Image (cartoon, rainbow, N blue to C red):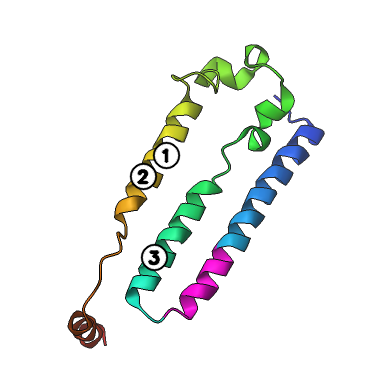
Amino acid sequence: MKADPKIRRMTADAIRHHLQGLYDNVTKLVEKLESAETVECIMDLKKEILRRWIEFFPLSEATCYFCNLHDLCETCEYAEHHGCCVSENSDYAAISSALEKLMDALDNYYKGEQYDEEAEGQNAETTA
């Protein structure tokens, strides 16, 4: 199947938009991370960076070639092989569900715990 230039451009533009959003969000967080004064603040910012990566994952109608090409799943070539995206059994739904589980798992990445100063000094000596 040959790609339609207009649809290809729409899809690329949408993905570029997601990428720019990710870049803008993560850049601001990294700038905050660079001036963070505590390990706890760094961990909290890193958690937010990880969340942004998932939030800007280009898995939407706008970033899908076939969604841009078709109005209905019934005429979609992708759906023939992977199921209609809105179906619970589709590959799209499986990826979307995995992203949701990953987002939930990030709740455990950093829970607000405090790290003592002594452990930090020992770690710095070990890695020096």
**Tag 3 residue:** 44
**Tag 2 residue:** 104
x and y percentages locating residue 58 in the rendered image: 58, 43
The quarter holding residue 78 reads top right
Q: CA distance from mark 3 to mark 2?
A: 15 Å
In the rendered image, the vertical position of residue 109 relative to residue 11, given as above or below: below
Q: Nearer the viewer, residue 51 or 79?
A: 51
Toward the right, the furthest residue is 6
In the rendered image, the vertical position of residue 26 relative to residue 9, given as above or below: below
**Decide: marks 2, 1 in contact (CB < 8 A)?**
yes
What residue span does the magenta drawing correspond to?
26-36
Residue 100's disc is: 1
Q: Residues within 10 Å of mark 1 (few under 14, many from 20)?
A: some
| Left or right of 7 on screen, residue 78 | left
- Residue type indicated by callout 1: Glu
Residue 83's disc is: none
Callout 1 secondary element: helix
